[in-house]
Image: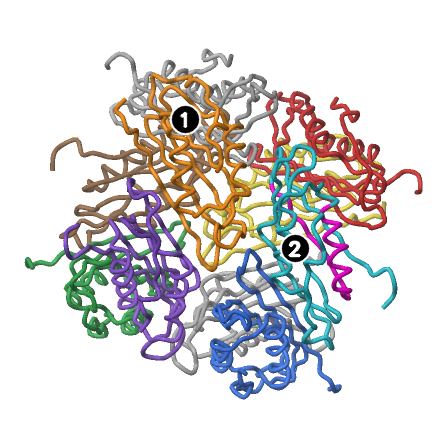
Chain colours: A red, B yellow, D blue, E cyan, F green, G brown, H purple, J orange
Amino acid sequence: MADPKLLQTFPNPASRRDYLIEHTHHEFTSLCPMTGHPDFAEITVRYVADRKCVELKSLKLYFHAYRNEGHFFEAATNKICDDLGAALRPRQLTIIADWKARGGFTSRVTAEWRAKKKR
Amino acid sequence: MADPKLLQTFPNPASRRDYLIEHTHHEFTSLCPMTGHPDFAEITVRYVADRKCVELKSLKLYFHAYRNEGHFFEAATNKICDDLGAALRPRQLTIIADWKARGGFTSRVTAEWRAKKKR
Amino acid sequence: MADPKLLQTFPNPASRRDYLIEHTHHEFTSLCPMTGHPDFAEITVRYVADRKCVELKSLKLYFHAYRNEGHFFEAATNKICDDLGAALRPRQLTIIADWKARGGFTSRVTAEWRAKKKR
Amino acid sequence: MADPKLLQTFPNPASRRDYLIEHTHHEFTSLCPMTGHPDFAEITVRYVADRKCVELKSLKLYFHAYRNEGHFFEAATNKICDDLGAALRPRQLTIIADWKARGGFTSRVTAEWRAKKKR
Amino acid sequence: MADPKLLQTFPNPASRRDYLIEHTHHEFTSLCPMTGHPDFAEITVRYVADRKCVELKSLKLYFHAYRNEGHFFEAATNKICDDLGAALRPRQLTIIADWKARGGFTSRVTAEWRAKKKR
Amino acid sequence: MADPKLLQTFPNPASRRDYLIEHTHHEFTSLCPMTGHPDFAEITVRYVADRKCVELKSLKLYFHAYRNEGHFFEAATNKICDDLGAALRPRQLTIIADWKARGGFTSRVTAEWRAKKKR
Amino acid sequence: MADPKLLQTFPNPASRRDYLIEHTHHEFTSLCPMTGHPDFAEITVRYVADRKCVELKSLKLYFHAYRNEGHFFEAATNKICDDLGAALRPRQLTIIADWKARGGFTSRVTAEWRAKKKR
Amino acid sequence: MADPKLLQTFPNPASRRDYLIEHTHHEFTSLCPMTGHPDFAEITVRYVADRKCVELKSLKLYFHAYRNEGHFFEAATNKICDDLGAALRPRQLTIIADWKARGGFTSRVTAEWRAKKKR
Amino acid sequence: MADPKLLQTFPNPASRRDYLIEHTHHEFTSLCPMTGHPDFAEITVRYVADRKCVELKSLKLYFHAYRNEGHFFEAATNKICDDLGAALRPRQLTIIADWKARGGFTSRVTAEWRAKKKR
Amino acid sequence: MADPKLLQTFPNPASRRDYLIEHTHHEFTSLCPMTGHPDFAEITVRYVADRKCVELKSLKLYFHAYRNEGHFFEAATNKICDDLGAALRPRQLTIIADWKARGGFTSRVTAEWRAKKKR
């Protein structure tokens, strides 16, 4: 399973302000866990940083780690949400995954992270 | 009439979280009940799963079952909404059907499911 | 003046539910009452049916009846709104008319129907 | 300065109803007051009429009157808003001016009219 | 570091009214502080002026000043927000920076300015 | 049948040169001769003038004359080609008619005029 | 197999002239002969009529006849080409079939008809 | 009439090679000589320079000179072609003028320059 | 290296006719041989079959075989051309590979196959 | 001046075949030699390699070298053509430079390289 330890962070340069950061990865690919065939998605990470921002190159490597792993759409999106939530402890975090055409369907899964403990 | 028993489900992998799943089928086709001519639509299933998610291949087969059946736009959209509501018992469910050009018109029908009993 | 008696209805197949029906006619044409030159518009009928739905072919014939009549943009849009409101007695009704380029302008008129008596 | 007396009106044909009228002029041009070079914009007039509607041909002539006048983006948009507000005394009025590319920039100015006295 | 003194202002020609001004610069470029490679962005300045409006040519020169400087996406967007906030003291101010494709990603950073002292 | 005498001409201002003139009418409408329902097309007149150019307003009136006449796609396109060929005696002439969606089809008919006598 | 006798013709109204007729059907659907799953295509019939033109409604019914038949892309396109060539004996005929996404692929098959005997 | 003396040139920096230069002006405007109303066009100057290239700012000023002059589409395009041909004496020159919507029409006029004397 | 033996064929159903088959794969991915990072391409196989057509599912599996292999753009395109040429011995064959954005570049490589022996 | 020695090459992996390679750089920027303001272009390098292909990363660095240099559109395009022709000695080479909007203009310069000596 794609390792969340690949995610690296740097200190938020403007933590006094709630501002929105969105990174959209256009080249996400994993495998269908049932057929082994490749799936493709566009993944958006949208967050308000608290102390930490995700370093973009590490985010790319984390996404590359899914390339040869089998994941259902719903599960992959939630795992990305959990991993980034744990790594960044952000003020807000939403993951939007747009899965490309498969059998006449396109799919979008949208998950929002909430800290389990209060800040 | 397209059989809702075709719909298969799997357990929601992240039921602790309210997250949004949207599947858009680009290749829905049924027949006009008055003329027998084919109609075409793009159908979006947008829901927040409770315990069950709809399995995508079974959803495709369920939609294929409309291919040679006569349905009015309004009735087909509501039947899809009822069938998926009954199969998934979701936290929220919306069906959006975009019917392609017919006689200089395009049409959209949008129906929202509500559980008859409280959860 | 285009005759609202052209509008035919059928019983709402899902009246227990508030759901949205939108029909967009891409081929509306009438005449400018001042110059006699043709005007073109795209007309959207968006409504929540109560007991009656508008039959699509009759709606087409009703729109065709404007072909050789002179109407100002504002007046035509309100007449369509009044005629459909009276024929359907819907829970909600909005008419959106997008008039094509005329003298370097495009125009949109949007009117919402409200029942004069309570339901 | 473009003369607001060019604006002509006609009685609102459906004053019992609050409905929205939008006219978008795609061919507005004026001059930069600093360089004398031409500027181009798309201007939208969006309003809810009270007693008066603006006559479309007179609106075109009013906009043509800016052709050889120097105006800053911010000032031109506010003058159009003031002139139409005074001529129509509408229930609501918004002017949206989309200025085309100039020095690598595009600009939009949006102004809303409010009656100084109550209606 | 790009000098905020490059920003020049002129008096708001319609300060009695809260109206929205948006300038989008399509040709922003700076350098990646880690690799030295060029980054490209589209920057939108959206504000409600109080007493001062930003002069468009000076805004262009201010943006040009980033051409050979190294800036992280998050830091550059916040610096632009701080510099314009200090220069204009506006009623509202939002900066939206859309960074072009880098390593399969596009990014958007959105920051809103708030006066530290009350007005 | 739409009267070719509606077509007016003016002398070619640059007859020493073979240059191409194209006028595209976006608002052509006629009736289906079988059902009486309206058809819509975009008609391009592309020609190299010899002595005469077609006057644009007269071309519009000539096209408007089809509004309430029944014409098959193939026949209408050839009649337009014949009428303009006879009126202009051009060096070259092509008519391209793009008929809008009807029963799931779009159609294009392209006809080229040749003088019956040699020039 | 879809019956070419469904194709009806009418006499070419302008047979003295070589002119091009194109009909594009946006709603072709057949079945995959291996999996039984539906395929969708956009089919263009482009021809220069000799004595006969294809009647558009009969062409629609001929295409509808493929709805529940299994056909490979290459074979279906060639059968359409053969059937229309035999029915129309045109001066030229090309069939272009654009098959929608299947397994990450889109496909186009283009076949040209030539009379077996000389004209 | 717009003065061709406004056109300035500079020596072709690569005259040993036949290479193609295209400048497209998106903001051309002149007046209709019959109604006085503004016309808008996009003008492309496409040429192979011989000894001289046209200086871009002077080309802009030359086009601005049409702003308040009355010109027919056909005549304006040919005048631009003649003026640039005389100023540049190019190896090849084509002018393409795309006139925006007027009365439901768009128009394109394309003229090619040929030296009257041999080179 | 991706194994050409994955490619399966079936007999050309219309070998008496030269007709064009194009399959475009939208989901090709391989690795950069220098950095190991993923590359993405859209690959079109355009050919005139002689005796054999490529079976579409086998073509998909052949393309999937590149997923974890390192290939330069120019070499991958030529290998695909060679492998399909050898498998099909077609009358004509062209491979067009559109490589997605990498370092601010997009690339297209187009190779045509010619039989080494005469047919 | 941007140094052609930055261009690195690798041996053509398929030199037995004439095949087409196109690299489009979307992020070219240089300075206007008259005003010092930045210019932006999209540059396409289209060639048939003989013995050498251009290495993509070196091409990027070569283009980056223009960032702070003043170049006229026509001269820059020809210099790129000359430098790549000298470095690659290709069988064919075309450079297409699309310069972004400047003063209401967009420009394209297209230059083709020919070897001075025969191959």
Q: Chain of mark 1?
A: J
Q: Tag 1: residue type?
A: Ala
- Horizontal side of A8 relative to B61 (left or right) equals right
Q: Which residues are magenta?
A: E76-100
Q: Please, what secondary structure does the residue beneath circle 1 have?
A: helix
- Horizontal side of G46 relative to B95 (left or right) equals left
Whole-Å distance between the Cαs marked 2 and 1? 39 Å
Q: Quadrant of residue H42?
A: bottom left
Q: Is residue D37 above or below residue A12?
A: below
Q: Please, what secondary structure does the residue beneath circle 2 have?
A: helix
As drawn, the residue found furthest toward the right would be A118
Residue identifier under label 1: J87
Which residue is located at x 90 percent, y 38 percent?
Answer: A116
Which residue is located at x 35 percent, y 40 percent?
Answer: J111
Instruction: Decide which of B38, E48 is in the foreground and name it.
Output: E48
Q: Quadrant of residue E85?
A: bottom right
As drawn, the residue found furthest toward the left would be F118
Q: Is residue E88 magenta?
A: yes
Residue identifier under label 2: E62
Q: Is residue J57 above or below residue J27?
A: above
Check whether the beta carbons of the residues at disc 2 and disc 1 lie within 8 A of each other. no
Q: Is residue B23 magenta?
A: no
Instruction: Decide which of J89, D61 is in the foreground and name it.
Output: J89
Instruction: Decide which of H52, A3 is in the foreground and name it.
Output: H52
